[in-house]
Amino acid sequence: MEKPVEQQYYDAKKAMEILNKPTTTFYREVREGKIPHTGKRPSMRFPKEAIDALAEVGLEEEHEKLIFELSTIADAWTKQEITKQPYGDDDAVPFKTVLEWRKRNNDISMHVKDGNKLVGWVTFLPLDESVIYALIDDKIRERDIPPQSIKRWTDRRLSIYLPIIEVVPSGNLQKDRDRGIFLIRHSIKWALTLTIQYDIKNWYGIGTTPEGQNILEALGFEQINSLDGGKRKGYILNSIVKPAKLISHYLKMMEAQDELVIPEKIKREISM
């Protein structure tokens, strides 16, 4: 015998209790179509069979909605705050220096956000080549880069230094890996776009970890020096367009074989 209609449904309060969701989250998921219902507030009803099944099986896992966009000055300050605490770094670039760089070229950094939360970033510095070699030879550090050595994208025969690619660890290794892949993929797309738009002759990077060195080498960079018994290596890439197929292969390899290694705390994969 079929149950009366009123026995086939929960009211909102009971459905929230069974699904263990606060009011705001519950109604947001109702609007998104994740929780079946009939009627409109305040007379919504929720089918018992559907709610009981959701309580047992769970809702579909939400995926992050990551964005990759140009960093603002406010974003640059947020990055400074994240990297200061709790992992203080004596080699960190002072915010005043960052502002001086941006005054010369405001389009040198991109970031990854999950909603409004900053979770990763990358910087490309068009520099005097002599300054880049001083960095590679460990004669100066990034905090010592003079603002006047920063080039504009419209300058001729540019040399680009890759100072940093970072992901902020979340405590979830899978999430960190997904963010890292997203950041690297979009950083490469940005680099390819810049190469097409501007007169870039070569790219430079420094690998100070095995992971950073592996990434640079997989992307086609060639080693040009080695310091500290190989712990610190300098690299050059004469053209970023030429190894485009290799880049595509490397990204597929990372996704298929979990090649991207995320550290326990913030770490520079390609850095000083």
Image: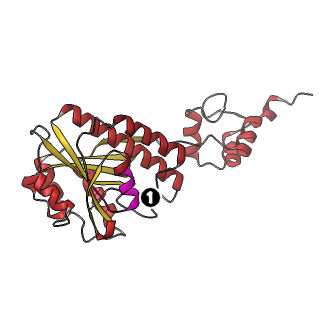
Q: Out of 25 and 210, give the one closest to the viewer.
A: 210
Which is more toward the observer, 218 or 63? 218
Over which residues does the magenta segment extend? 206-215
Please identify the quadrant where the C terminus is shown.
bottom left
Crowding at mark 1 (Cα within 10 Å: few <14, some 14-19, many 20+): many
The amino acid type found where label 1 is placed reads Pro
Which residue is painted at 43% across and 42% down in the image? 250
Residue 68 coordinates in the image, percent (x, y): 35, 41
Of 69 and 128, the residue lying toward us: 128
User: Magenta region's main secondary structure?
Assistant: helix
Q: Is residue 219 magenta?
A: no
Q: Residue visible at 20% across and 66% down?
A: 138
Q: How is the image coloured?
A: secondary structure
Residue 117 position in % (x across, y down): 39, 50
Image quadrant in which the N terminus is located: top right
Residue at image position (70%, 39%) is 11
* Residue 168 in the figure: left or right of residue 10: left
- In the rendered structure, the answer to whether residue 20 lies left or right of residue 120 reads right
| Horizontal and vertical percent position of residue 140 | 16, 66
Where residue 16 sits, quadrant-wise, is top right
The x, y position of residue 256, in whole percent, is 53, 43
Is residue 6 shown above or below 67? above
